Image: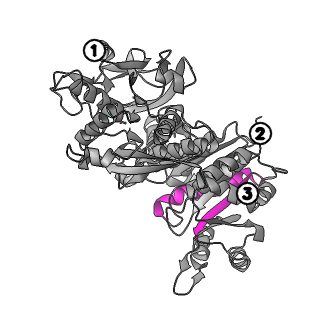
Amino acid sequence: MSKQTKYIFVTGGVLSSLGKGIAAASIATLLKHSGLKVSILKADPYINVDPGTMSPLEHGEVFVTDDGAETDLDLGHYERFLDENLSQDNNFTTGRVYSSVIEKERRGDYLGKTIQVIPHIVGEIVERIKKAGEGKEILIVEIGGTVGDIEGLPFLEAIRALKSEVGRKNAMNIHLTLVPYIKVAGELKTKPTQHSVGELRRIGITPDMIVCRAEMALSRELKDKIAFSCGVERNCVIESQDCQSIYQIPLSFLKQDILTPISEFLGLGELKPNMQNWDSLVKRIIAPTNETTIAFVGKYVDLKESYKSLTESIIHAGATLDAKVNLKWIDSEKIEDENVNELLKDVDGVLVAGGFGERGVNGKILAIKFARENNIPYLGICLGMQLALIEFARNVLKLEDANSVEFNKECKNSIIYLIDSFIDAHGKEQIRTHKSPLGGTMRLGSYSCDVKAGSLLAKIYGNQKHIIERHRHRFEANPQYKTAFEKAGLQISGTSNGLIEVAELKEHKFFIGVQFHPEFTSRLTRPNPTILGFVGASLDNAK
Ligand code: GLN
């Protein structure tokens, strides 16, 4: 029999956006760096089957895993902290749980029983948690939402039941709350924490540890008060103070000796994480030596959460290069012929991120033209790559109507088009139709890309012949134009089974467009080579 996986359940109280995902990822990181086999799971109580269809305005970024699952953005944090590839098993929602229970019911799997929240829905949640923990020593389970939400009840019941099933030393509860500072009183207040723990207890969950999010440090007396009123040990009140970088949190937890009580609860013995490398990267994030400024051209500049992985990947590259990377956010809808020069004249690099729909496309094309003509390092990601090809076709190849069928179905020079079928990340053929591209299937997840020797792509990936990166898009670059592009100096340096994955300019400091999303595989301790290469080129340009 395989060894019992130990569970750490992380719940949140008082309000959302307290950084529960970061706290969970930080604990996971400390345990992994102590040599344990750790994984992490996010259970989301909302009804959408996955966040794939949710607007970035509603839910921030959609994070794509290796196996092509569209998941919650917290999974991105988990991967960036843990440096592990997670899968579709590491995130599920109420919608997913109900659809599989209903599917089983329709199949007759329940042998005529009445299907109810308890035991069937809760049982399905428990099974999914167990599955994500298979083969791991520790599974951290973050429950989305806040204690007291009606939709969260089955999830809380599931962790209550699972804890009592696996017993002592095999599960513990960590509750994250807010300790607000009330200015007029000049005091940090513990009442919301007491109420939220009270709410947890009412449904049968006793927290073993409280993590307090606060603007400032908690005094010893305040921690004692929380310990006393919430019924936890004094060394089990941990603070999570606002700080400059999220990557400081594991170090702050470690300094507060969070691992001693965790180890006692779960019987893990002495834990001594090696955080040396992490520590030196964080020091370079906090006090870097160099500096560069990159124009971030996008559609949702007011909603930076929708580019979370990308902005984090730039921080990773900056940490490795000991550089502060200033992002100059530019709303692509505001870029025009008249102002592009003014907007971009003082930046060291130009980045056009991925996106869907026609809004802001012209501004992005103007930014790309400016970077190409003025020898400014350029990175185009997904849509940013597609538009680089369109810009080149229009302005260099003089194909005036060059476009993507995403924006003009009838255009004669469809530089970006729709292919009829492709092989998905699981090796299955997916059919797409021209008639209903929106309902069509997206190319999602990891694909291998062949790298052309001697190219810029080869250089930034250390001369690897094949690289693996993640995708999330419907449209593809049309190979019919490959020869024309190459003749005019735009080299196709990355391909995957005939599909164009990477294009780059020969006579340029650094100009590359990638169909994949390099940001999804970047980690603090292992920045993505495309991002690192681009930030490095911008840094060189700044000097
Ligand atoms: N809209 C483009 C496509 O679907 C690009 C998508 C993206 O940038 N993620 O192909």
Residue 190 place in picture, x, y as percent: 61, 78
Q: Can residue 121 be seen in this view?
A: no
Question: Which circle, 3 or 2, is nearer the viewer?
Answer: 3
Magenta residue check for 156: yes
Q: Does the residue labelled 1 lie within 8 Å of ligand 1?
A: no
Q: Determine whether the residue tagged by mark 3 lies in a helix, strand or loop.
A: helix
- Write the start and end of the magenta stretch as one range: 149-178
- The residue drawn where x is 21% and y is 34% is 407
Question: Which circle, 1 or 2, is nearer the viewer?
Answer: 1
Mark 1 touches mark 2? (CB < 8 Å): no
Is residue 530 left or right of 187 when viewed as pictured? left
Residue carrying label 1: 484
Residue 403 place in picture, x, y as percent: 22, 28
Is residue 286 left or right of 505 when viewed as pictured? right
Q: Determine whether the residue tagged by mark 2 lies in a helix, strand or loop.
A: loop
Residue carrying label 2: 3
Q: Residue furthest right?
A: 269
Q: Which of marks 3 and 1 is nearer the N terminus?
A: 3
Closer to the camera in the image, 155 or 23: 23
The mark found on residue 202 in the picture is none
| Mark 1 Cα-neighbour bin, 10 Å: few <14, some 14–19, many ≥20 | some
Tag 1: amino acid: Ala
Location of residue 286 with respect to 311 vertically, above or below: below
Residue carrying label 3: 254
Location of residue 192 with respect to 133 vertically, above or below: below
Tag 3: amino acid: Leu
Closer to the camera in the image, 359 or 292: 292
Q: Determine whether the residue tagged by mark 1 lies in a helix, strand or loop.
A: helix
